[in-house]
Amino acid sequence: MRDVIIIGSGPAGYTAAIYAARAQLNPLLIASSVEPGGELMKTTEVENFPGFPEGIMGPELMTNFRAQAERFGAEFITEKVTRVDFSERPFRVWVRDDEYRAESVIVSTGARSLMLGLEAEQRLIGHGLSTCATCDGFFFRGHEIAVVGGGDSAIEEATFLTKFADKVTIIHRRDEFRASKIMQQRAFDNPKIEILWNHTVTEINGADKVESIEVTDTTSGATSTLAVTGVFIAIGHRPNTDLFTGVLDMDETGYLETVPGSSRTNIEGVFACGDVQDHTYRQAITAAGSGCMAAIDAERWLESQHG
Ligand code: NAP
């Protein structure tokens, strides 16, 4: 029996663990064994996390977060949560057959970037391949790069990336964008943006950094090589919320809904923070900030329960 169980690691979960541990709530953080530490474990240099003027590697930053939470007594289980029951208190959380109980739960399971499914993606992510223009655009000053996708994210990222890159080619699998008209016009009007309609990326070349990509024409089947040193995949995100279907309120795309200005979900005593409830900012620093909010909300709520 715990005061708080935190489900999911990453900047939000680890920050919630630091705050909850320092508030003497003895938090137990259960993180997936597939990707403990979350999306930042897949990045290389992080230059925009305040406090690190020289930058820091993503995995090192997450190791530091965890060590800081451990220092104050947070405990960790690195296994996937398989089931939850929030219908009554104490709340129950299962890892296979092991049951854990808690007065309150903080959900910080994050969201994952959709990928193309190419083998090279695993090897080259963080080495010229990125899913976040805000995070990595700066590294591509003077480069020629590609953005994959045809939604608002792809157009927004491509437009942002023209601040740094000499040329940005948007590669879209159809002959029209899904993005809003105003965003599309921004791309059409930008002299640094070129659009490759009806093409998919079928290979990303490079042993330890992106050197070029193979693209295939979806109408003719013809393939060609594009000499780019950066590729941004912007084909959407999926929040990791399958566990909470029918339990916690979600928007139509599966993101958890929280009461504005707080981390409260529709179930009293269950809080959500980080990318699992934020499809707008998706930054380590905003996730960490909302993890802090969730721990404070949980602490105050527990206090109100115990009078
Ligand atoms: P999205 O709207 O789902 O668009 C995904 C795009 O990726 C689509 O063009 C899709 O092609 C393409 N795609 C999907 N799977 C692919 C694959 N395997 N290979 C190649 N292309 C693939 O996602 P999003 O752009 O991330 O936007 C998500 C939501 O956030 C939307 O509601 C969007 O309006 C909103 N958003 C708003 C703003 C803004 O207003 N400033 C900025 C960003 C996002 P098809 O078109 O052929 O399906």
Image (spheres, rainbow, N blue to C red):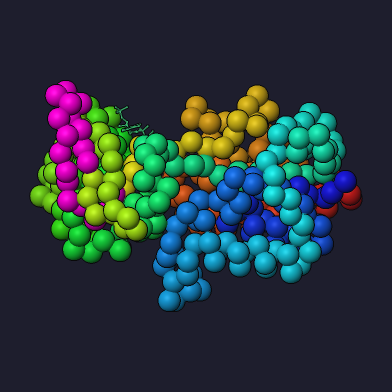
Give the x, y percent position of residue 76. Answer: 74, 54
Give the x, y percent position of residue 69. Answer: 70, 64
**Magenta-colored span:** 214-231
Q: Residue at x 79, y 64 (%)?
A: 73
Left or right of residue 275, residue 211 in this image: left
Location of residue 223 (image quadrant) = top left
Q: Residue at x 30, y 63 (%)?
A: 139
Left or right of residue 137, residue 169 in this image: left
Task: From the viewer's side, name the closer residue of 119 and 112.
Answer: 119
How many marks can you see? 0
Image quarter for ligand 1: top left
Task: From the viewer's side, name the closer residue of 271 and 83.
Answer: 83
Is residue 89 something that shows in the picture? yes
Is residue 92 something that shows in the picture? no
Q: Is residue 219 magenta?
A: yes
Query: Relative to 139, is 280 above or below?
Result: above
